[in-house]
Amino acid sequence: MEASQVELVQSSFDQVLPIADTAAALFYKRLFELDPSLRRLFHGDIRQQGRKLMDTLRLVVSNLGHLDRVIPGVRALGERHAAYGVEDRHYDTVGSALLWTLDQGLGAAFTCDVTAAWTAAYALLANTMKSAAAKLEPANA
């Protein structure tokens, strides 16, 4: 990612943080609208899951300029998600739900440049998680 994209992701996420609980609720609502079968992957309080999502995003977004600090954790997250039953195809749905949520939360501030920056950031993270999960598959076969 370019430095300008990192700045756009970080500054736009700062605008989302005051409505983090609402954004998380919107995200899961949209995720389940896009793929109702994903509900089976979530157990317990979805509000608590939303807080975990926002905490994870906060950590990753704040360290986008220093990916070496978070990549090991992102890989571990990918491995855990694979163990929960997350498949590669689910990442596209999650990405769509995330971008939709950001659009809802940011409104006019969700410009083409901000969209492109978030798309790049999400692709980096999703690909890292999928790669980590793929390394587990031969051991699980």
Image (cartoon, rainbow, N blue to C red):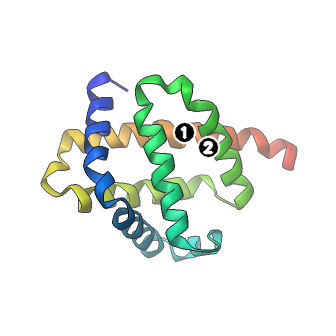
Q: Position of residue 42 (x, y in %)?
A: 62, 70
Which amino acid, mark 2? Lys
Q: Are marks 1 and 2 in contact (CB under 8 Å)?
A: yes
Q: Position of residue 87 (x, y in %)?
A: 63, 56
Image quarter of residue 86: bottom right
- Describe the element under mark 2 as helix, strand or loop: helix
Count residues near mark 2 (Cα–Cα under 10 Å), then give few for <14, some for 14-19, many for 20+.
many
Q: Is residue 141 visible?
A: no
Note whether 37 is above or below 92 in the view shown.
Answer: below
Q: Residue 130: give its label.
A: 2
Q: Residue 127: give its label.
A: 1
Q: Residue 86: give its label.
A: none
Q: Residue at x 39, y 64 (%)?
A: 21
Q: Residue at x 57, y 70 (%)?
A: 38
Q: Residue at x 64, y 32 (%)?
A: 72
Between the C-alphas of marks 1 and 2, the distance is 5 Å
Note whether 57 is above or below 90 in the view shown.
Answer: above
Q: Position of residue 106 (x, y in %)?
A: 21, 55
- Residue 96 or 12: which is nearer the viewer? 12
Q: How many marks?
A: 2
- Describe the element under mark 1 as helix, strand or loop: helix
